[in-house]
Image (tube, rainbow, N blue to C red):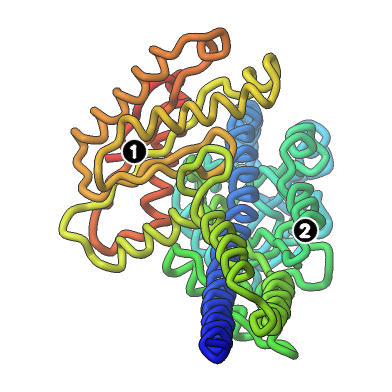
């Protein structure tokens, strides 16, 4: 009997050791996958922050732009008429033109060279050498006689941000140009994505560099001697060119010592209101994998400790170990507060569904609780947390089999639909909005729901694309006044 007890005890210890080893290995692999998801989230967070700032600048710029555009057009048409009377541009008093217009003045000849200007850094600048795409655009504009005003642009000479207007002379010999620097304007001080980029680098240890690159390959507001992509390594340039040509984010990695590496990402950006090629830009970011390496090292250390514990533990230890490991597994999938799926699950599930090329299209609803910040401000965060729990319950009560409720963070939720149709999404959205309307209580009187939805357009559409279309639809709902649903056709 004693031997039986010993055998059973030994068997339990071995069983415990195997279980711990298996779960430790699974936990290690899951941590690696989670780290990959977190890294992707970091990339998206940083790039979306910069894109949002640029969108804000571009939108704010439209208001700023109207008055300058009107003034530029008036002044340039007047200068073109003056050219008819005096085509000898070398005799022009350009200092007087600058004083009258309160703008920098440029004259560009048929070789696309600035032959005369009040802005000395640009004197003699040959666009054929520095800016091939823009030189082609100048040739097109020289053949026309209409006034042209570009959007937010960068100076080819100094790389800072400017507003430019152009008009060709009637004989097509010259292009007359006026420019206004934006760096000292209140607009730029209020909406400066370069300051935002600097704060992001301070916030995230893995983030080493953020640059905004113009369509001509210049670093906007460059703070070092690397002014253009031509100052960068060949692999860097090649990846940048792929991003520009494909219109999609590209990346490459370089190996460092001891498993460390650098990741370089290039994400194209085009302003909603496209004006010339100045609105085409690329967001460049560079990251290390230091956080990933630290997490994996810690995970390996924990694995060794757990294996050692397995040989001196008992049945109770086995039960405790099960309990220890079930919690992180659940945390990897569910949101702690609302008990719905979290973003990590969302990414895994979408990846799984899209990999299997399902017969039916995937649908995605994104939703925000309108005025949720007011609830936190007026009633406190505990009440806000309770509202989020109840809202999660509302979503669960209205979904069917094959639907997945996800919390992305804050008051941002989503629902994945395996077999999506436009009608199903409309009906589900209406049920959710009605359920929120039916909730009683002082805090619920402040709340409504804005929803945006999109259905996978083809089997090859990516999660990023589907999410972006649903997010754009949500933005349109909010723009229309909130408390509604918009479908991304």
Could you tell me residue 92's position as x and y percent? Answer: 76, 46
Which quadrant holds residue 62? top right
Label 1 residue SS: strand
Taking depth in this image into account, of 467 and 211 the one nearest to the observer is 467
Q: Is 123 above or below relative to 152?
A: below
* Circle 1 Cα neighbour tier, 10 Å, few/some/many (<14 / 14–19 / ≥20): many
Is the C terminus in the top left, top right, bottom left or bottom right quadrant? Answer: top left
The residue at the point 52 percent across, 82 percent down is: 15
* Residue on which the image places disc 1: 453
The residue at the point 70 percent across, 62 percent down is: 211
Could you tell me residue 342's position as x and y percent? Answer: 50, 49
Given this view, does label 1 or label 2 mark the residue nearer the observer?
Answer: 1
Report whether 7 appears left or right of 311.
Answer: left
Name the mark on residue 201.
2
Q: Is 154 above or below relative to 235?
A: above
Report whether 83 appears left or right of 326.
Answer: right
Label 2 residue SS: helix
């Amino acid at each position: 009997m004693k031997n039986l007890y010993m055998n059973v005890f030994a068997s339990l210890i071995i069983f415990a050791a195997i279980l711990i080893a298996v779960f430790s290995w699974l936990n290690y692999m899951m941590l690696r996958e989670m780290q990959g998801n977190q890294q992707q989230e970091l990339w998206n967070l940083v790039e979306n922050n910069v894109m949002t700032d640029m969108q804000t600048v571009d939108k704010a710029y439209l208001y700023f732009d109207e008055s300058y555009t009107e003034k530029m057009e008036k002044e340039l048409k007047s200068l073109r008429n003056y050219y008819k009377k005096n085509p000898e541009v070398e005799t022009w008093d350009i200092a007087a033109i600058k004083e009258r217009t309160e703008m920098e003045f440029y004259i560009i000849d048929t070789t696309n060279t600035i032959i005369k200007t009040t802005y000395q850094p640009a004197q003699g600048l040959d666009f054929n050498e520095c800016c091939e795409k823009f030189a082609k655009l100048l040739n097109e504009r020289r053949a026309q006689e209409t006034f042209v005003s570009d959007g937010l642009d960068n100076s080819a000479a100094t790389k800072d941000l400017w507003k430019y207007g152009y008009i060709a002379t009637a004989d097509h010999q010259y292009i007359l140009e006026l420019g206004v620097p934006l760096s000292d304007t209140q607009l730029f001080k209020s909406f400066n994505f370069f300051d935002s980029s600097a704060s992001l680098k301070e916030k995230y240890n893995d983030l080493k560099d953020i640059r905004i690159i113009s369509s001509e390959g210049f670093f906007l507001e460059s703070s070092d001697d690397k002014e253009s992509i031509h100052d960068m390594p060949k692999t860097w340039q090649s990846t940048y060119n792929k991003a520009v040509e494909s219109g999609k984010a590209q990346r490459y990695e370089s190996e460092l010592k001891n498993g460390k590496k650098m990741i370089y990402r290039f994400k194209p950006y085009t302003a909603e209101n496209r004006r010339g090629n100045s609105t085409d830009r690329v967001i460049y970011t560079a990251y290390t994998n230091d956080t990933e390496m630290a997490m994996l090292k810690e995970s390996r250390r924990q694995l060794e400790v757990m294996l050692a514990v397995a040989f001196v533990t008992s049945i109770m230890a086995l039960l405790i170990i099960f309990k220890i490991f079930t919690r992180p597994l659940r945390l990897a999938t569910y949101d702690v507060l609302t008990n719905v799926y979290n973003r990590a699950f969302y990414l895994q599930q979408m990846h799984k569904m899209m990999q299997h090329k399902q017969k039916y299209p995937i649908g995605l609803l994104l939703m925000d609780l309108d005025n949720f910040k007011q609830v936190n401000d007026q009633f406190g965060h505990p009440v806000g947390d309770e509202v989020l729990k109840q809202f999660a319950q509302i979503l669960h009560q209205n979904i069917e089999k094959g639907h997945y409720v996800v919390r992305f963070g804050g008051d941002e939720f989503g629902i994945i639909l395996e077999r999506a149709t436009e009608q199903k999404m409309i009906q589900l959205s209406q049920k959710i909005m009605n359920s929120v309307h039916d909730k009683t209580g002082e805090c619920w009187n402040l709340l409504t729901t804005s929803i945006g939805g999109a259905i996978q357009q083809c089997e090859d559409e990516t999660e990023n694309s589907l999410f972006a279309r649903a997010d754009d639809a949500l933005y349109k709902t909010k723009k229309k006044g909130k408390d509604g649903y918009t479908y991304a056709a």
